Amino acid sequence: MNTPLSPAEELALIDGELARLDARRAHLAARRDWLLRLPPIPWPSAPAPPSLPVKDASGRGAQNVLLTLGAVLLSVAALAFTLVSWGSLGIAGRAAVLAVVTVGALVAPLPLLRRGLRSTAESVAALGLLLTVLDAYVVHAVGMSTVDGTAYAAGAAGVLAALWAGYGFASPGLRLPLPVAVAAAQLPLPLAALASAADPVGLGWALLATAALDVVAAMTVPRARAAWPAGAALGVAALGVGLVESAATPGASAPALLLAAGAALGVAVAWRVPRASAAALAGGLAAVVAVAGPLSPRWDTGWAVPAHLAPALALTLPAAVGAASVPAAVRRGLARAGLGVTAAAALWALASVVPSLAARLRVLGEVWAATTPEVDRPATGAAVAVTLLVTAGAAAAAARLMPARPEPGVLAVVLGWAGLFAAPVLLGFPVAAVLTAQLSVTVAAGALALRPRPGRSGVGIAAAGCALLGAGSVAVGALDGRLATVLVLGALTAAGAAGAAYRPGPGWARSGAAVLAVGWATALSAALCALSDLAVVWWAPPVLAVAAAVVAFGPRWGAVRVPAEAASIAPGVLALALAAPDRPALALALALAGVVCATAAVRADRRRLGWAAWALFVAATWVRLSASGVAWPEAYTLPVTVPALVVGFMRRRRDPAASSWTAYAPGLVATLLPTLIAAWGDPHWQRPLLLGLASLALTLLGARQRLQAPLLLGGATLAAVALHELAPYVVQVVGALPRWLPPALAGLLLLAVGATYERRLRDARRLRAAFGRLG
């Protein structure tokens, strides 16, 4: 470039420009740093950033889709070539194609991995693995077509699994070969068992051996984690085969050996892997069946259940004693296996007991129809009884080992009661022995409920529930015989009374015993009445005697007095219901019930029962009068009026400030109003005359004693009676007078009242004041 400046001048100019540019750059950099340190401020005039197109898929996702699609297309092409175009090539061509394509597909991923193309390498490796499967198929189709297909598949699967595993170890950058090798390794042994026509146990051995190999691979090869789920699936399948065969052929040893090996494998896995308690659980179940299977009789006899129960209980020992040398996963798994089998055995036994005990409900349809009823005894009765008692003992032992947990104690009580209560029936004892044994077990359960247990009420509640169920069942079973009914109900009554009197027992248990004692005594009274051939309506007095006994001995009940007296309402209501069809019997029952309430009302804390006694006495009187054909209303109202007036008089004596309306009005209205209504319709003169005399006396008495209620009620009744007597004459007089005379007389009356309004108003005020001074 030609320039008029000399080199020295041009160099100086360039240096100056560069110095200015450096200064400008330093200024801009400092300004930029200052702006970056400022807080973000939303500038309204700042232009919005340009919107960019949204990308629906990431670059890696698009890459994976393309690679997968390419691998699928190549696989389809390989299949088409193998199945369609294979026959057009000769032997040399076939071998060349197989060798070149397979080797190329398996080798190509290696340089791809070195270049960082992992996804592409995985896709090409998948194609190569598929080609090896096609190679195996082609080898069988061309050169080994006479070999059994299942046997060839077993061998080919083993070879391919080994080749794929070696390929995976040789190319550690690929993730696909080892999982595929694990999947292929699951086939050789099961396919070989099928090819050799092995029995189900042989197939189970093949499955179990494969599962064991999976476990070894998963534990020793860090990259073979896929062997865990495969081994678990095949192990469960092998144990399933063993369980089915053991149940189908009791006493056989071959399934037991298979299950024993499976149990050892499961425990070994749990021993090595801390979180594999499920393996110990499966191993424990297999061990139970392995031990019990060869010794187990047929399932229909029921003894197979106790045979499996014994080893199941033994499995819980490591967890029960807390053996430190046994890993926690093994202890938990074995304990859960043992408890699961024990629970299943207990449920089976309970389900077998229920139909036998429920069958006695048929007695309700034919009470006292036979003296020696048949007892339903299942074929598995002895086995059921043994199972219940053994499980109850195990639960009791667990309760001692775990005193802080209430569940074992509750289970021990329920299972023990069920076993002891049902054993006489299940073992076919005579009826008398059955009832005696069941009654004893019921009383024992009640005694257990009454035993004080601070902080452990669950056992007591369970025992009380068992005692209640047992008492009901024994009572129903005893209804088949007269003597049995009386003896059982008497024993239950005595047991309930003894439980209510047992003062150390908890309050709720004693209260329940008292209520049951009253109930059983009521049932006993009814049974004795039935034995005496009394008419049903005359059962009421003996039944009511139960309530009378409760009231008579009320203070001696102590803390359970209230529930006992509340329960005594039931026999009272039952007595009235029994006597209801016959009015004389009902009157007697009402009177006796009134006597019972009056007896209770004598005590200071039961005064309110006096009202119930009065109501019952009145009802008894009414029913008796109705039964005698009495139709006079006074006969029904006077029994109410007289006691009411006596009560009002007593109240006025205690409280002189009490109003006469409160004290006397209810009793007076109870008789005056019905008698007045009857007098208005009575054509005779006796009732109006007597009512008038009574109301006159009542009015005079109210005026003398200065009582508002008797004065007003008596005066109003007297006026009504007088009006009733004068009504016929008034009608005659009105009929004889001219029609204009009544209105004229009414007008004169209004004029007279209006003329003397102020004086009449003053007289009315004096009268009201005088009336207000009355009581």
Image (cartoon, rainbow, N blue to C red):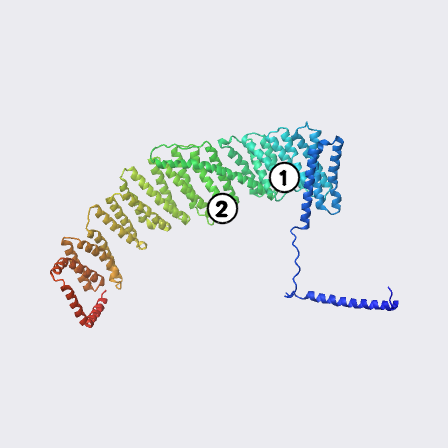
Q: What amino acid type is highlighted by mark number 2? A: Pro
User: Which residue is found at the position 30% from the left and 37% from the top?
Assistant: 531
Residue ID at (68%, 50%): 59
Residue 206 drawn at (x, y percent): 63, 33
Q: Residue at x 18, y 68 (%)?
A: 750
Q: How far is the residue under mark 1 from the one under mark 2?
A: 41 Å
Q: Nearer the viewer, residue 26 or 173?
A: 26
Q: Which quarter of the figure has residue 767? A: bottom left
What is the number of the mark on residue 298?
Answer: none
Q: Position of residue 70 (x, y in %)?
A: 69, 43
Does residue 595 appear to the left or right of 207 in the view shown?
A: left
Q: Residue under label 2, please give it.
A: 406
Tag in front: 1 or 2: 1
Location of residue 690 by image quarter: bottom left
Q: Position of residue 44 (x, y in %)?
A: 63, 66
- 1 or 2: tag closer to the N-terminus: 1
Q: Residues within 10 Å of mark 2 (few under 14, many from 20)?
A: some
Read off the residue under disc 1. 230
Q: Residues within 10 Å of mark 1 (few under 14, many from 20)?
A: some
Q: Is residue 87 above or below residue 738?
A: above
**Going by the image, does 104 lie left or right of 376?**
right
Circle 1: element type: helix
Residue 618 place in picture, x, y as percent: 24, 51
Q: Judge whether residue 502 can be spotted in this image.
A: no
- The kind of residue on which mark 1 rests is Ala
> Furthest residue to the left?
736
Q: Is residue 464 left or right of residue 741?
A: right
